[in-house]
Image (cartoon, coloured by chain):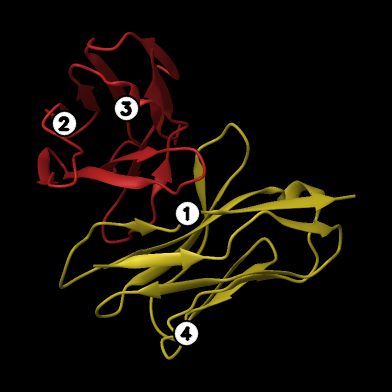
Chain colours: A yellow, B red
Amino acid sequence: GDSVTQMEGPVTLSEEAFLTINCTYTATGYPSLFWYVQYPGEGLQLLLKATKADDKGSNKGFEATYRKETTSFHLEKGSVQVSDSAVYFCALQHASGGSYIPTFGRGTSLIVHP
Amino acid sequence: DTGVSQDPRHKITKRGQNVTFRCDPISEHNRLYWYRQTLGQGPEFLTYFQNEAQLEKSRLLSDRFSAERPKGSFSTLEIQRTEQGDSAMYLCASSRLPTYEQYFGPGTRLTVT
């Protein structure tokens, strides 16, 4: 079955540092890939997405590129802020030809210090 | 667009009692999903609806769990004869075809004592 593996957290950074959160997946076919963010006490929010190989999703300074050859979708940001402190979830979902069940990773907690 | 709402936000119940949670999706969103989330884990898929049809329910955790979406709008998730292991956050999300971006509600936190 499908699976998503994220790097263990927490990731602790100083403000303005570079961020990478690794995400790899196992799936048949060509799923769409997503990053969601969950701030304390809130529901998950879509951060960015990519629907096919080599697509780059971007939003609010975050980026991730759909790498079919390495089955990866790593999240990056050039300069983090304290307000980016949250839990980040990588997810996949097939849009056709198979199960439509979404699969989420365990989440990676990010803590940004001033 | 008022977002996905869930009610109640918190529920404390005694073991053996039945509980029901409600989810109101974004209007005109035709897909609705239910998840369970435990501490330190990602959302665990339970079931989903497309309009009023429940298209996948094999992932419901046991036959004590059931969900409905009678008119293709709001949905309810019921847990019968609750157990302490049912304590978790229950999340609802909706989406509108043809996109698969999900919009999540704030969740209902269930505590079974």
Residues at discs 1 and 2 both on one chain? no
Of residues A1 and B97, which is closer to you in this image? A1
10 Å crowding of disc 4: few (<14), some (14-19), many (20+): some
Chain letter behind tag 3: B
Spatial CA span between label 4 and label 1:
20 Å
Q: On the image, numbered disc 1 is attached to which residue?
A: A106
Residue A67, disc:
4
Q: Of discs 1 and 2, which sits in the foreground?
A: 1
10 Å crowding of disc 2: few (<14), some (14-19), many (20+): many
Chain letter behind tag 2: B
Q: Of discs 3 and 4, which sits in the foreground?
A: 3
Classify residue A47 by image quadrant: bottom right
Q: Is residue B107 left or right of residue B46?
A: right
Residues at discs 3 and 4 both on one chain? no
**Which residue: 41% across, 25% down?**
B108
Residue B69, disc:
2
Of residues B101 and A105, which is closer to you in this image? A105
Residues at discs 3 and 2 both on one chain? yes
